[in-house]
Image (cartoon, rainbow, N blue to C red):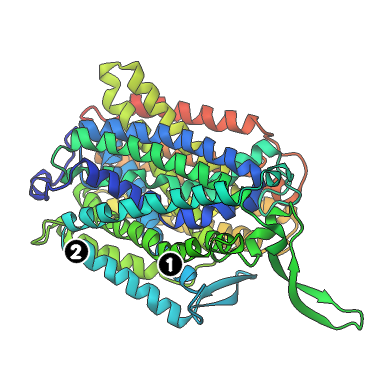
């Protein structure tokens, strides 16, 4: 399991983290802005069924966590999530997963900063404003809010730059608070404000689950309402596994312990949030025509059971703080406002360090300049952190919504998590351990299913990112090899650029903006873009295999990954979360056969990945 590159640099890393540091780092990442906003997002999507969404998500995330726990116990590495795919499957998978994960974490850091500023707007005016973004009326940061978010990101960078032990100790100091506050809120709402009748209110209107069956809506809520965003933080201990005193034993324990503990907290929190709703005090700003014909905007009460209205109601900006204030728990409401700083910032501290370690890991894989793997005098990847800061600032824009940026981050992360399961299978294939092979398969299937449930529209920008990463890989390879690969890479990049344009401008923009576009036109554009991307990618990989002998192991060991991501996109288009969810009608692949299709394709890809893994893995 020795990966190419910088084993010597690995030995220079600080080895100062222990079990409870790892637990604290994971909890710091998991209990971030997700617990502040996901209960409302999930409730608005499918009401009381959101509790089931949390249970399903926790089970699938546990499968992924177990796969990474096994990997970390066998080969602790800093930047592990991007180094394991490289070690197991070669350059093609290593580069594409590294690019996806780098962009994922780059978006998570500013998302946490934005969430903090949003909650701050609850008591500090002038930080946010309403604006039209992509044809929708949304809340964005004002220049003053943007400056505050910028300052938050820079402070987080400074904490990380001065050493991993500082990150561990900050996380350890925050861990007690980050567990105590949610548990106190849960206990208070259940004991003093719980109304079981709220669970009897059917989902009369769904924000994003319109037209889905109840079972399909349970699954669809997981990636797009903040549920998966919250739970996927378990990876942080794995990322820091090269910097522990006894990482081989401590990291697996920390991963399992943190996932189990936070899953229980989130499920109980969802129950408490729904039970604590007081519909008579929840209002939405609606346009009303008076008897004299005058049109005015005023607050109107929300009808009990109109769950989708929660997303645009007077409690949407700070849902838990608002709910606590409404039910008369004002002191706890103030604590929630304080926690709106502590929880996201604690997560952001870990994410910044994680981003630096991803850059370190990609440099270790040879996909970024070797200098980025260098350590500063505090034994952390300083240049990697500077790159992380730059990427975070690039993403620090007035995002359309926390849920939108969270969905992108979750989906790009999940497509990398598939390779956690496949890497475990590749590393343990020779041992013929049925237990480990099953653990790897379950982890891969869990990641694929959650990514699929996001639906066609959120998956489009992620698919664009993926095929663009493939084109970038081919171009970099062409310039670094002494072959005629440039004649393959440049036409392929042009085809990908045209496909990306069609998907982004002709499909994603109108569908995500609510612009009316005839179904036939969307179908034509989708068919053209997918056909172009599939055929051009297949042709480029085939030509690369024939022309560049050095590229053959990577293509042989990574073609399954290209096929899997493309298959998930195609099933998304043809299943109940695709075109039929936009235009109505019966999907070509109905529920639950779509789930069977995704699981089957993932299992085929999994076993192909194990069989085609380079022998040195």
Q: Position of residue 376 (x, y in %)?
A: 11, 61
Q: Residue sitting at 60 percent across and 70 percent down?
A: 138
Report whether residue 13 is seen.
yes
Callouts 2 and 1 close, C-beta under 8 Å: no
- Helix, strand, or loop for circle 2? helix
Position of residue 265 relative to residue 560, above or below, is below
Position of residue 133 relative to residue 184, above or below, is below
Q: Which residue is mark 1?
A: 116
- Please tell me the numbered disc located at residue 161: 2
The residue closer to the viewer here, 186 or 405, is: 186
Q: Position of residue 292 (x, y in %)?
A: 91, 83
- Helix, strand, or loop for circle 1? helix
Taking the image as shown, residue 449 lies to the left or right of residue 135, namely: left
Image quarter (top left, top right, bottom left or bottom right) of the N terminus: top left
Q: Residue sitting at 72 percent across and 49 percent down?
A: 210
Image quarter (top left, top right, bottom left or bottom right) of the C terminus: top left
Taking the image as shown, residue 197 lies to the left or right of residue 146, namely: right
Q: Tag 2: Cα neighbours inside 10 Å, few (<14), some, or many (≥20)?
A: many
Sooner in the amino-acid sequence: mark 2 or mark 1? 1
Taking the image as shown, residue 113 lies to the left or right of residue 281, namely: left
Q: Quadrant of residue 347?
A: bottom left
- Please tell me the numbered disc located at residue 356: none
The mark lying in front, picked from 2 and 1, is 1
Q: Residue sitting at 65 percent across and 59 percent down?
A: 310
Q: Residue sitting at 26 percent across and 48 percent down?
A: 483
């Amino acid at each position: 399991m020795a990966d190419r590159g910088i084993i010597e640099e690995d030995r220079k890393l600080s080895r100062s983290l222990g079990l409870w540091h790892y637990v604290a780092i994971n909890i710091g990442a998991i209990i971030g802005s997700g617990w502040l906003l996901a209960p409302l997002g999930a409730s608005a999507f499918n009401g009381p069924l959101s509790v089931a969404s949390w249970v399903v998500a926790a089970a699938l995330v546990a499968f992924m966590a177990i796969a990474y726990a096994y990997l970390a116990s066998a080969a602790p590495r800093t930047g592990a999530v991007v180094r394991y795919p490289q070690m197991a499957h070669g350059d093609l998978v290593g580069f594409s997963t590294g690019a996806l994960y780098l962009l994922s974490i780059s978006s998570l850091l500013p998302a946490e900063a934005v969430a903090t500023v949003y909650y701050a707007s609850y008591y500090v005016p002038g930080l946010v404003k309403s604006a039209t973004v992509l044809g929708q009326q949304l809340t964005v940061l004002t220049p003053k809010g943007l400056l505050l978010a910028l300052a938050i990101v820079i402070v987080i960078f400074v904490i990380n730059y001065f050493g991993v032990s500082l990150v561990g100790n900050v996380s350890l100091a925050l861990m007690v608070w980050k567990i105590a506050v949610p548990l106190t809120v849960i206990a208070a709402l259940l004991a003093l404000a719980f109304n079981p009748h709220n669970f009897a209110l059917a989902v009369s209107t769904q924000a994003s689950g319109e037209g889905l069956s109840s079972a399909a809506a349970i699954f669809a809520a997981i990636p797009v309402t903040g549920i998966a965003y919250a739970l996927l933080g378990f990876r942080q201990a794995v990322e820091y596994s090269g910097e522990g005193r006894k990482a081989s034993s401590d990291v697996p324990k920390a991963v399992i312990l943190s996932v189990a503990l936070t899953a229980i907290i989130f499920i109980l929190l969802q129950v408490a949030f729904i039970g604590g709703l007081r519909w008579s005090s929840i209002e939405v700003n609606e346009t009303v025509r008076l008897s004299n014909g005058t049109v005015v905007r005023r607050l109107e009460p929300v009808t009990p059971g109109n769950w989708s209205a929660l997303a645009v109601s007077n409690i949407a900006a700070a849902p838990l703080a608002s709910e606590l204030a409404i039910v008369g728990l004002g002191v706890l409401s103030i604590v929630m406002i304080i926690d709106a700083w502590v929880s996201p910032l604690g997560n952001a501290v870990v994410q910044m360090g994680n981003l630096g370690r991803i850059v370190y890991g990609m440099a270790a894989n040879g996909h970024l300049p070797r200098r980025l793997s260098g350590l500063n005098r505090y034994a952390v990847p300083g240049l990697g952190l500077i790159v992380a800061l730059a990427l975070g600032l690039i993403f620090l824009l007035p995002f359309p919504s926390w849920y939108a940026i969270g969905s992108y981050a979750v989906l790009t992360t999940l497509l990398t998590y598939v390779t956690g399961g496949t890497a475990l299978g590749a590393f343990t294939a020779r041992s013929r351990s049925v237990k480990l092979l099953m653990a790897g398969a379950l982890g891969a299937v869990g990641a694929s299913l959650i990514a699929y449930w996001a639906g066609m529209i959120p998956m489009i920008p992620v698919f664009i990112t993926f095929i663009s990463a493939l084109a970038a890989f081919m171009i970099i390879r062409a310039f670094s090899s002494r072959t005629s690969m440039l004649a393959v890479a440049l036409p392929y990049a042009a085809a990908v650029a045209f496909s990306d344009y069609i998907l982004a401008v002709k499909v994603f923009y109108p569908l995500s903006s609510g612009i009316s576009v005839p179904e036939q036109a969307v179908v034509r554009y989708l068919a053209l873009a997918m056909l172009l991307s599939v055929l051009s990618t297949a042709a480029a990989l085939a030509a690369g295999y024939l022309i560049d002998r050095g590229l053959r192991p990577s293509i042989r060991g990574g073609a399954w990954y290209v096929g899997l991501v493309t298959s998930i996109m195609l099933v998304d288009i043809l299943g109940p979360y695709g075109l039929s969810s936009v235009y109505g009608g019966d999907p070509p692949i109905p529920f639950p056969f779509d789930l069977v299709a995704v699981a089957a394709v993932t299992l085929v890809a999994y076993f192909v990945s194990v069989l085609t893994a380079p022998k040195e893995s």
